[in-house]
């Protein structure tokens, strides 16, 4: 059973590592960023509401995100586990998740904090070329991360669920450290 939360700043490599682990352990990769980008592409109501926030590097309002997570974690394919990538991203989302997991009688096995220095993050993001990877937007995303998401590190540390991994290493090295955590 694998139930994991991936924390870490934008550009830390959450998406890449999450994809790899989810393939290996056959659990769904639940990325709120991917879900939102798909909604924007398909021009759904969610996409139209979320697009402006994403383009400026702000968090999309919780009322657009929470219902989506509830629905996703109630799907059958989550029976053997899940990996949350990009959620929770603020204290309210973390509290919502806590209550939701209790309600569906599940618990999270570990919260993984992928650590990467700021200068490396900026360099990686600038090289990626997504619409929200412009310098001023990147700066705002990092600021939003520090203000709203980083407090979750202490929160999960307090629950003794946090595992920190150095994300500033070869992809394979990071994957192998993550695998050890999953299998421990
Ligand atoms: P990154 O981690 O590189 O910033 P993501 O794909 O996780 O990229 O997120 C991209 C954007 O999608 C965020 O800047 C934000 O606007 C929106 N987003 C993703 N997940 C959430 C969330 N849990 N709550 C609010 N907004 C979110």
Image (tube, rainbow, N blue to C red):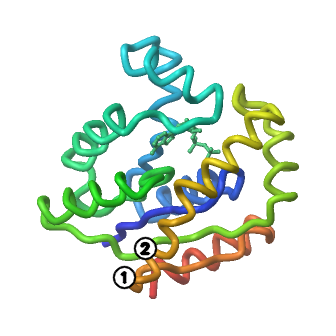
Q: Quadrant of the N terminus?
A: bottom left
* Image coordinates for residue 184, horizontal then vertical, percent: 45, 88
Q: Is residue 69 left or right of residue 110?
A: left
Res. 155 mark:
2
Res. 22 mark:
none
Q: Is residue 30 left or right of residue 52?
A: left
Image point (47%, 52%), residue name: 89
* Image coordinates for residue 65, horizontal then vertical, percent: 36, 38
User: Are there few (<14), some (14-19), or many (20+) residues within 10 Å of tag 1?
Assistant: few
Q: Which residue in the rendered view is the most extreme toward the front?
A: 147
184 or 150, which lies in front?
A: 150
Q: CA distance from mark 2 to mark 1?
A: 7 Å
Q: Is residue 21 left or right of residue 93?
A: right
Question: From the viewer's perspective, is residue 183 above or below residue 128?
Answer: below
The answer to the question of whether label 2 and label 1 lie on touching residues, with beta carbons closer than 8 A, is yes
SS for dot 2: helix
Residue, disc 1: 159
Image point (53%, 28%), residue name: 37
Question: From the viewer's perspective, is residue 63 above or below residue 100?
Answer: above
Q: Is residue 165 left or right of residue 153?
A: right
Image point (36%, 59%), residue name: 94
* Image coordinates for residue 19, horizontal then vertical, percent: 55, 53
User: Are there few (<14), some (14-19), or many (20+) residues within 10 Å of tag 2?
Assistant: some
Image point (48%, 79%), residue name: 162
SS for dot 1: loop
* Image coordinates for residue 110, horizontal then vertical, percent: 42, 75
Q: Quadrant of ligand 1?
A: top right
């Amino acid at each position: 059973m694998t139930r994991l939360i991936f924390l870490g700043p934008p550009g830390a490599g959450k998406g890449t590592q999450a994809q790899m682990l989810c393939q290996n352990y056959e659990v769904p990769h639940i990325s709120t960023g991917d879900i939102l980008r798909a909604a924007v592409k398909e021009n759904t109501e969610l996409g139209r509401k979320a697009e402006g926030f994403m383009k400026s590097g702000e968090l999309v309002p919780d009322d657009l995100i929470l219902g989506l997570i509830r629905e996703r974690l109630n799907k059958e394919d989550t029976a053997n586990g899940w990996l949350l990538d990009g959620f929770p991203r603020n204290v309210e989302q973390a509290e919502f998740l806590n209550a939701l997991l209790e309600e569906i009688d599940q618990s999270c096995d570990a919260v993984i904090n992928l650590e990467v220095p700021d200068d490396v993050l900026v360099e990686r993001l600038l090289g990626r070329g997504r619409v929200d990877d412009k310098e001023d937007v990147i700066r705002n995303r990092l600021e939003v991360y520090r203000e709203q998401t980083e407090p979750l590190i202490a929160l999960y540390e307090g629950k003794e669920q946090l595992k920190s991994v150095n994300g500033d290493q070869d992809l394979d090295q990071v994957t192998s450290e993550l695998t050890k955590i999953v299998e421990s």
